[in-house]
Every structure is written in structure tokens, then in C-alpha cells.
Amino acid sequence: MSEIVKLRSATHFQCHTSTAAYNLKKKKKILICKNTKIYDRYVIEKVVNGGNYGQIYLAVDEANRKNLILKVVHENYEPELLIMERNILMKLRGKPNIPLLLASGNYKDYVYIGLERLGKNMSEIRNLQKSKVFSPISVVKIALQAMSALELLHNNGYLHRDVKPENLVIGGSPDSISTIYLIDFGMARKYLDGNGKIRPSRKTVGFRGSMRYVSIELHKRYEHTPQNDIWSLFYSCIELGEGGLPWRSYANEDDILAKKSTIKPQELCTIMPKCFGDFGSNIGNAPYFECVNYQKLYKTLNSLFSKIEMDNHFFEWTKRASIYTTLKSRIIQ
């Protein structure tokens, strides 16, 4: 695995391992042409998504003829986001619910990482359902897998800071179609120091995340904590099970904050069991130096359905697996 060098920062770039990173209306400049071979191994097949400075490609590893996703960013446009993702994926390599890092390095003026190909994200799959929602039991199973990935990330000293349905995807093969993967670690932050101690809280904290899913504390620009990631997961799950959030049409942050502040977690559950709201209530708003009680949250989720029900339930998308694992290009070549 070739080494990525640290380079200077410019404007923000973020991309995804799934097929829904960007919904482009205009054709963008192709950064790396089709059939280009990187290090005599990875052959570019097509652009999947991206912008003018960072793009995602479907490629083939000629060493084993397997598909992979290459995420590429120009060296002058925040390559450290890709470096952060590379470092996290290396540390969590082989762990469940985490994408597999296959390659990383530099190519001409670009920094790249290679990832296993994954399927569609939860937002895409939900919108393909006739009802536009997942069943409550599916939502609980999604929450359990996603929280397991977040617990792993937090225990290794990192915060995700952009948990949302688009960053929860299914596997790209029949064997992994029921596995939920947490993706996109470019906005992550290391919150534990080298000794495993929590880093001091910053005096000034900029906004990170997606407005619709962040916790009330992040609207107030408090320091990001593991609890905030779990709050984003809770709001994401409400959207998956209810079809939307009450503030989904709001554009003003103050209006979103006001709405979130006046609604209890249980009141968000009209299709979902009311006790799913207890999951939100049990997250709490712990002080910066207090740890998440993951076991309490797992217990809350596991109490909603019996083990037999959970084991015998299949996700909605498993019946038409090929629809949800097919990779489609968003840029016309």
C-alpha cells in the first residue's frame, strides 16, 4: 500500500463509497480518463460521481479482476480529508460494518484511496420503497448495526460527525446485502489523544454535519461528542421509519433548532413504536467528558422485538438484491 503524503488545505471535498454521492446536473471535467492504469494495476472504467476537484471511479484491479471504488481528490483541495479516511479505515481494517480499504497513494496531482464496492445507501433504498419507509423492525436492525460501527469508531478515538442515511449503505454482493456499512470518514475528528484521554474542549467550534440530523448541542456550537453521533443516528432512523422529520422543509437553522427543542423523541414516533423514542431519550446530553452508555442503548433497541422476530426478519431490499447493488454512473461519458 503506497504512502499518502500530507498536503495543504483548500476548499471542502467529500465523496462516498456508495452510488449516491452527488446528484450532478451538469457534466463535470473528468479528472482521470477511462482506461487509465494507476501503478500498472488499477484500471479506470468510469466516473461514478464527483465534482471538478474530487471524483469517484469504478475501477478494476488487474491483479484479481475485482471491481473497486477509487476516491480521488486533487492535491490542492483538502487531501487531508481523504488522508483522515485512509487512516481510520487502516485502523479499523477487517472490522464489521466498516468498508474495506484496498489501496491508497498518489497519482500525478491526485491523492486516492481504493475501497471495496458497496451498494446503495439507506436514503436511496427507502425512496425506492412503495411506502417510502422501512418497517420498524428493519429500522431497529439498521440502528443496531450502525451503532456497533459508531461504538467501534468512538472506542478507537474518532468521531464521525456526519452520520445520516446517505452514509449508511448496504454491501455490494449477495453475501453482504444485509450488512450495514458506515461510510465517509472525511469529516471525522480524533477526540482521544495518544494516551486514550479525551482532548480538551475547544473554545470555538465550527459547525460540522448535516443540519437535518445534528443534535441540539451542535446547533449551539458545543463541542462534538460521541453522543452527538448517536443523536444523528436516531434522527436518521426516525426518517427511515417515518418517511421524514418534522423540520425537513426548514431552511433556517434557528427554525430547525426551535422545532427540535420542542419535540420529545417519543413524539417523533407515529409509525415507529413509541418506545423507539426511548432510544433517543437514553442518549441524553452528557457532558463532554462523559462516555456513551452503549449497553443501555443496545438494551433499549433489543427490547423492541424478540430475538426470534429479529433473526427471522429480512430487510425489504433482500428480495430484489440486484437493484440495490448495481452501480450506476451519474456522469455521462
Image: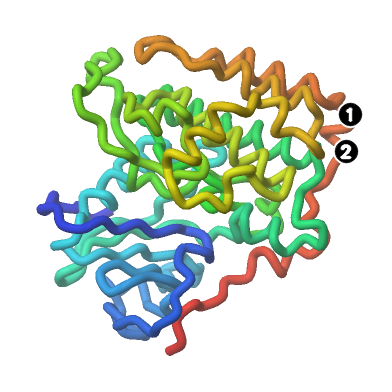
Pinpoint residue 28: horizontal percent, then vertical percent.
34, 81
The residue carrying mark 1 is 308
The residue carrying mark 2 is 312
- The amino acid on which the numbered mark 1 sits, given as a three-letter code, is Ile
Pinpoint residue 115: horizontal percent, then vertical percent.
43, 57
Is 211 situated above or below 145? Answer: below
Q: Quadrant of residue 293?
A: top right
The colour mode here is rainbow
Nearest the eye: 224 or 311:
224
Q: Which residue appears at 73% of the width and 64% of the height? A: 128
Rate crowding at label 2 as few (under 14), some (14 to 19) or many (20 or more) other CA atoms within 10 Å.
few
Q: Could you tell whether 116 is left or right of 278 in the image?
A: left
- The amino acid on which the numbered mark 2 sits, given as a three-letter code, is Asn
Nearest the eye: 28 or 57:
28
Looking at the rendering, in which quadrant would you find the C terminus?
Answer: bottom left
Marks 2 and 1 close (CB-CB < 8 Å): yes
Q: Distance between the residues labelled 2 and 1?
A: 6 Å
Q: Which residue appears at 84% of the width and 26% of the height? A: 305
Nearest the eye: 96 or 17:
17
Nearest the eye: 49 or 32:
49
Q: Which residue appears at 48% of the width and 16% of the height? A: 285
Q: Which residue appears at 54% of the width and 16% of the height? A: 284
Q: Could you tell whether 92 is left or right of 240 in the image?
A: left
Q: Does dot 1 land on a helix, a strand or a loop?
A: helix
